[in-house]
Image: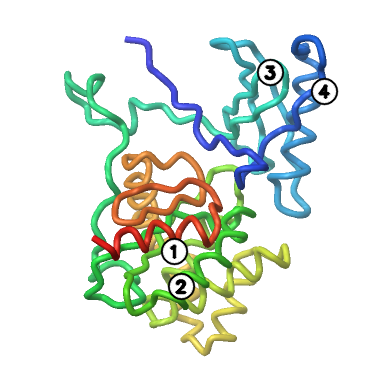
Amino acid sequence: MKKSIILGVLLIFVLAGCALTKNNEVAGVKILNIEEASARAEKFINDNLMPAGQTATVKEVVEENGLYKVVVDAGNGQNIDSYMTKDGGTFFPQAMDTAKTTPDNSDSANQPVAQEAAPIDGENEYVKGNKEATVDVIEYSDFECPYCLRHTAAMDQIFNDYKDKIRVVFRHFPLSFHAEAQKAAEASECAGEQGKFWEMHDKIFKANEAKNMSVAQWKTEAKNLGLNTAQFNACLDSGKYADKIKKQTAGGQAAGVTGTPATFINGQMFSGAVGYDTLKQAIEKELSK
C-alpha cells in the first residue's frame, strides 16, 4: 500500500510561522518552473530558517503529488525532504511518513492520527506551577525555533498570572532542520538532573535571541548556573537524554503536533505562537468548568 505523507510543519508568517510570500498575480496564479522553485526555496530557507553562519543548499526539485518536492542539504550532510506549492506561495519544511507514527495493525488506516497529549508525568518531567491544579498546559517546543522564542513571552505571562491555578510542562520537539535544537534540548535535561531545568531553558532561549547557540555555549551556561560542569559536560557529550527527547517528540507526533510551538490546554491543541489572549481565554474556560 502506498505510504501516505503528512506535509508537516506548515508555517505561515501571519499565523506565527514561516511561509513564502504569495506571488502578486492579478489574473490567475503563476506556476514556477523547476529552476525558479529551487532558487525561491533556497533563498527562503537561508533567509528565514537557518541559524546564523549556516547555509542550506537545495539539491533537487521534482514534481510530486501536485507539489514540488524540495530536497534540502541543511549543511550537516543530512538531506531533508520538504515540499512547496507550485506557485511558490507556501513551503512545508519537513514531511513525515505516517507509517512511522501510527500503530502497525490492520486498522491503523481507519484510526485518527491525532490524539490528546500524554498526561503529565510528574516523576519524569519538569513541572512548574500548582502540582495539584486541574488545568494542564503542555508546550511542545524547539529551542532553535524563532516562533518558539516569540511564544516564550506569552507563556511567561500566562505562568505569572495563573501559576497558582495551572501546571506547566515543557516537552521537546526539535526539528531536523534546526542544527542546534537537539543538543539544546539535551542541555536542558542535563541541567535538569542538577535541579536547573527551567533556568537552562531560559538561558537557551536567550542564546536563540542572540543567535549564539552551540554546545560550547551550553557548557558556558552550565558554569554560569553553578552546575557541576564535569557532570554536565559528560551528560551532554554522551547524549544521555537523547532517547527521552526522541520519545517526547514521538508523543507529540502521535498527538497531532506537526510544528512548533504547539500548546495543549487540557487536551485542546493550539498551533503556533498564538498569543497571550488566546491562551488566557482557553485557561479561563477550563477554570470555569
- Give how far across and how far down residue 212 sits, in percent: 70, 66
**Location of mark 1 (residue):** 238
Q: Badge 1: how crowded within 10 Å, few (<14), some, or many (20+)?
A: few
Tell me the kind of residue under disc 1. Answer: Ser
Q: Badge 2: how crowded within 10 Å, few (<14), some, or many (20+)?
A: few
Query: Taking 222 as reference, is 280 above or below it?
Result: above
**For marks 3 and 2 on the same chain, the one whose residue lies earlier in the sequence:** 3
Left or right: 180, with 2 as reference point: right
**Location of mark 3 (residue):** 61
* In front of the other: 205 or 287: 287
**For marks 2 and 4 on the same chain, the one whose residue lies earlier in the sequence:** 4
* In front of the other: 189 or 66: 66
Quarter of the view holding residue 216? bottom right
**Location of mark 4 (residue):** 24
**For marks 1 and 4 on the same chain, the one whose residue lies earlier in the sequence:** 4
- Give how far across and how far down residue 234 sits, in percent: 46, 73
Q: Do the CB atoms of the residues marked 1 and 2 lie less than 8 Å apart? A: yes
